Amino acid sequence: MTTEERIKLITRNLEEVLTEENLKELIESGTPLRHYIGFEISGKPHLGSGLALMYKIKDLVDAGVECTIFVADWHTWINKKLDGKIETIRRLGRQFWIEAMKAGYKAAGGDPEDLHFVQGTDLYRNHPDYWATVVEVSQNTSLNRMLRSISIAGRQEGENVDFAILLYPAMQAADIFALQVNLVHAGMEQRKAHVIAQDTALKIETNPLLNKEGRKIKPVALHNHILLGLAKPPVWPIPEENLRDIKISMKMSKSKPDTAVFIFDSPEEIRRKINNAFAPEGEVKFNPILDWAKHLIFYYPDTSFTIQREERWGGDLTYTSYDDLEHDYIVKKLHPQDLKKAVAEWLVKTLQPAREYFEEPQRKKALEEIESLTAPKI
RNA sequence: CCUGCGGUGGCCGAAUAGUUAGGCAACAGACUGUAAAUCUGUCCAAAGUAGGUGCAAGUCCUACCCGCAGGACCA
């Protein structure tokens, strides 16, 4: 595989690469590519964490990158998720999250054997100088900037937070250095943490990231598109200037389960949620169903997607590109209901390997425990 | 540690001590070949905790817990 081919595979369908030049340099320097993506153990993975990101990881594995899924138990603890106890979080990280990621990776067509898993607790125990890196990152980042970056933990600036939350961005950056990974990967909402890591990369002395020649380098950041949630935005129609912010704020939410499809949802749940989704006819600026079709179904360039329709609505349609589908949607040749049905069935089928993987009793039990810990209080 | 303000349903948010606020959300129907919007209807309660005063306490008093703001301390 040529450098160009690798870059193409590594960066395809991403919303942002920081930066392509650095990526090219990294590859050309002959430095082995080491990737990481971190997850909190905060509930069930949805289509974003459990499928879209897995597609990208599959690309990376195919491009010869060593891929690591970081199970961020300390970050989860800092964020007071689940029952707030580090022991529970640590255990479910192993019993649930790692297994869930394997399930998602299978659904994305990959072999879980290709993935590495590292849990935060183990990383910190094995790197006694980890905390020195946390200090160095902190010394090179202003308090205001840390405060602004807590959105990476799902918090808003000005929200009631305790001081521990400020450790979160510093630790996330330090994780990258301790893991010695040069491709850092996440959804767009994590870009603040990655930029902090890049801005401090050349300044730190403990665990600096090095290339093959032993020179300090910045990690390259790969950012996925954030899939839209299924709910109607609070203001509709959306003012043009706010479109970007609204889209980010309208992501799938674990606290509003009907805005998300989780990778273990039953076929009935998938069909119900999709059917209830916000989907204005002919509207493409904010349309979760189209968004999902674009970023999931048409992820691969050679996709062929057939929409079954009753004869009275014109019979079946087959698309080989998202642009064709979007065009027909805009001109209202393709009705939302027909698209919804097809997308739902695609998800039912695609997620089947994940559901099957979690029929195994031990995993099923862990899933039930996660559900009991994250169930909305009534 | 001190002072002040606050703590009401899943969320926001009212009520001179005297018996159902309201809104959002949710749910169900109607209308749409989906959803949304719009109608119609439904369901939901509690008072941070523990005591006290009163015929009667969300409302007054005390203590404690939590949050916010400020202050004190800083040899």
Image: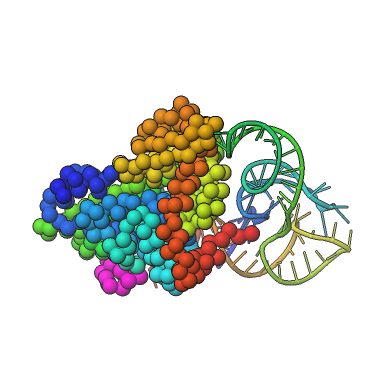
Height in image: A338 above or below A120?
above
Numbered label tally: 0
Residue A129 sits inside the magenta stretch:
yes
Q: Which stretch is magenta?
A: A121-134
Q: Residue at x 45, y 65 (%)?
A: A358
Which residue is outermost to the top?
A331
Q: Residue at x 40, y 65 (%)?
A: A99
Q: Residue at x 26, y 45 (%)?
A: A11
| Residue A194 in view, yes or no | no
| Residue A225 in view, yes or no | yes
Give the overall secondary structure of the magenta segment. helix
Residue A285 sits inside the magenta stretch:
no
Picture coordinates of residue A84 (x, y %)? Answer: 49, 67
Q: Residue at x 35, y 37 (%)?
A: A320
Q: Nearer the viewer, residue A161 or A258?
A: A258
Q: Nearer the viewer, residue A85 or A368?
A: A368
Picture coordinates of residue A268 (x, y %)? Answer: 55, 53
Height in image: A317 above or below A276?
above
Looking at the image, residue B40 sits to the left or right of residue B32; the answer is right
Q: Nearer the viewer, residue A311 or A63?
A: A311
Looking at the image, residue B72 sits to the left or right of residue A145; the answer is right
Picture coordinates of residue B25 (x, y %)? Answer: 62, 45
Quadrant in which residue A30 is drawn: bottom left
